[in-house]
Image (cartoon, coloured by chain):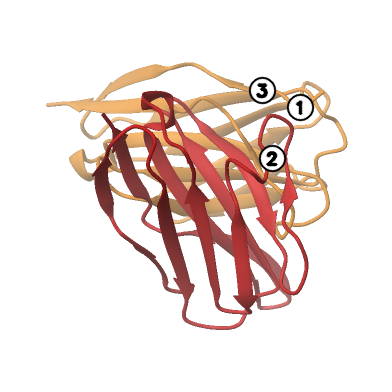
Amino acid sequence: SAVISQKPSRDICQRGTSLTIQCQVDSQVTMMFWYRQQPGQSLTLIATANQGSEATYESGFVIDKFPISRPNLTFSTLTVSNMSPEDSSIYLCSAAFRTGGRDEQYFGPGTRLTVT
Amino acid sequence: GEDVEQSLFLSVREGDSSVINCTYTDSSSTYLYWYKQEPGAGLQLLTYIFSNMDMKQDQRLTVLLNKKDKHLSLRIADTQTGDSAIYFCAESWYSSASKIIFGSGTRLSIRP
């Protein structure tokens, strides 16, 4: 398996501010994804982070609220903009790897965001 | 449509087998997964099964797939306290490099 790290691991932010979350992978990957896990809920895909082009957003998520960067094959950032308490969640990045001829998707440890 | 359903809670006695069930609606799913999430931790990929398989065994874990009924189960033999976690069933359609749809998660608790 691969090592995926995220920074920060947690943060408490004020309403109206923005937070950028970083995701670093220890090897080059084609596909990276950002998910949100609201308190007590399952994971919901926010967007696919494409290297060299704009991210692909899922229904209900927009670039103005969740801008994503993917400058190279090992790194991506997700910004949560103009935060409100409803944005309090765990944000997880994931990456797909080819292992033994198969694609496998692994997740980072998550960033726990609390908005006050 | 995309929908994966699981029961929310399961309680088993230490040493017994745990069986966590999942149903999905999209018959075109090609990969079905089980992920484990321990308190305060990220997601750990436990195992996955291709849709053309009926069963997969990996040490204490057995995955059964009934494609006709769109039913997936995870059996954990000899359940230990370290197995306490939330278990997510999930599906994807093309490969595990595609987006993954998660179920609501089943919280497994172990009683002595």
Viewed as shown, does residue A103 lie left or right of B104? right
Q: Is label 1 on the same chain as label 3?
A: yes
Q: Are marks 2 and 1 in contact (CB under 8 Å)?
A: yes
Q: Tag 1's secondary structure?
A: loop
Viewed as shown, does residue A113 lie left or right of B4? left
The subunit letter for the residue under badge 1 reads B
Within 10 angstroms of label 3, few (less than 14), some, or many (20 or more) residues?
many
- Of circles 2 and 1, the one toward us is 1
* Residue at horizontal 70 percent and vertical 57 percent from the top: B96
The subunit letter for the residue under badge 3 reads B
Q: CA distance from mark 2 to mark 3?
A: 10 Å
* Residue at horizontal 42 percent and vertical 73 percent from the top: A3
- Of circles 2 and 3, the one toward us is 2
Q: CA distance from mark 2 to mark 1?
A: 9 Å
Residue with the mark numbered 1: B2
Q: CA distance from mark 1 to mark 3?
A: 11 Å
Q: Residue furthest left?
A: B112
Which mark identifies residue B91? 2
Q: Position of residue B48 (x, y in %)?
A: 62, 51
Identify which residue, B57 or A28, lies in the foreground: A28
Q: Quadrant of the N terminus of chain B?
A: top right
Q: Position of residue A103 (x, y in %)?
A: 70, 67
Q: Which hue belongs to chain A?
A: red
Residue with the mark numbered 3: B23
- Of circles 1 and 3, the one toward us is 1
Mark with earlier residue (2, 3): 3
Q: Position of residue A95 (x, y in %)?
A: 58, 64
